[in-house]
Image (spheres, rainbow, N blue to C red):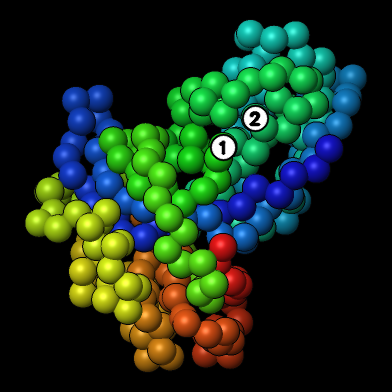
Amino acid sequence: MVSFPNAKINLGLDIIEKRPDGFHNIESCFYPVQWTDVIEIIPSKENNFSSSGIPIPGDPSSNLCMKVYEALKKDFALSPVHFHLLKNIPIGAGMGGGSSDAAFTAKLLNEIFELNLSSSQLEDYVRPLGSDCAFFVNNKPVFAYEKGDRFKNIESVLKGYYISIIYPELHISTKEAYSGVIPQKPEVGIEQILRKAPAEWKHLLKNDFETALFPKYPVLKEIKEQLYTQGAVYASMTGSGSAVYGIFKEEKDIKPLFSSSYKIWQGILE
């Protein structure tokens, strides 16, 4: 059985406070985009995992897909399977590719083995594996809060807009990104800002990680400025970086403007 785990972007990201458990409480809007990986699960004599596409660091046995299987196997009699992941979503880009792979694996296993788990139960299984894993279970625009793993539904505010996402082959770890930020409660919250038209977001909707990462990696700021120069109604780094996106009212091919070494995805938002 095959599935297509997709990426997400962050519309704004406020880092509110550091938690006693060492994580941070954040507020953001998670919005799905159709830059996808491909995962296939088939019966096998023994559990194993393979991948192609973008190289995935670390031991294959510790991949999130395998961790999801092990979490479910504690409660259900799962027979062995083989996972193959075609990795297209850049790693360390702030787009939640690994988290999406985990959530879609859980949904596939739920279907294959007829576990009859509800969406909320699937969220509970994947939530410990990563703060934004649970988002990809329902995979709809949400206002995310606490660790980014609690949600409130919002309208699809960008339906029909065109998006360009640029990944400049620059990996930024979550640990590095958080090391440079100072948590603080914003004067105007993201929920309130998103009630305005996207053309009004430019000076209101912010990603707190940009403050620390743009001086360190000037190319990110340059990409954002270039997107505005090309007519984006809103542009931002997503998550903890390093992908940067621009939102346009109409289709616009920006690939010729950037290095051929960059990974770029363009499409219409739902």
Estimate how packed mark 1 is, as few (under 14), some (14 to 19) or many (20 or more) residues with alpha carbons within 10 Å: many
What residue is disc 2 on? Answer: 106
**Which part of the image, by quadrant, shows the C terminus?**
bottom right
Point out residue 150 in the picture as x, y percentages from the top left corner: 37, 34
Q: Looking at the image, which is closer to me, 62 or 10?
A: 10
| Among numbered discs 1 and 2, the one appearing first in the sequence | 2
Give left or right: position of 249 versus 89. Answer: left
- Residue at the image point whose x is 45% and y is 71% from the top: 245
**Which part of the image, by quadrant, shows the N terminus?**
top right
- When asked about the image quadrant of residue 62, the answer is top right
Residue 153, compared with residue 95, is above or below; it is above
The amino acid on which the numbered mark 2 sits, given as a three-letter code, is Ala
Point out residue 164 in the picture as x, y percentages from the top left corner: 52, 75
The amino acid on which the numbered mark 1 sits, given as a three-letter code, is Val
- When asked about the image quadrant of residue 190, the answer is bottom left
- When asked about the image quadrant of residue 224, the answer is bottom left
Point out residue 73 in the picture as x, y percentages from the top left corner: 67, 13
- Residue at the image point whose x is 43% and y is 69% from the top: 244
- Pointer 1 and pointer 2: residues touching (CB < 8 Å)? yes
Q: Looking at the image, which is closer to me, 104 or 151?
A: 151
Q: Which is closer to the viewer, label 1 or label 2?
A: 1
Residue 68, compared with residue 102, is above or below; it is above
Q: Using the rendered image of the protein, determine whether residue 58 is visible from the camera's viewpoint.
A: no
Give left or right: position of 228 versus 253. Answer: left
- Give me the disc on residue 137: 1
Residue 224, compared with residue 49, is above or below; it is below
- Give me the disc on residue 267: none
Point out residue 187 in the picture as x, y percentages from the top left corner: 9, 56
- Residue at the image point whose x is 46% and y is 51% from the top: 141
Residue 35, compared with residue 25, is above or below; it is below
Badge 1 element:
helix
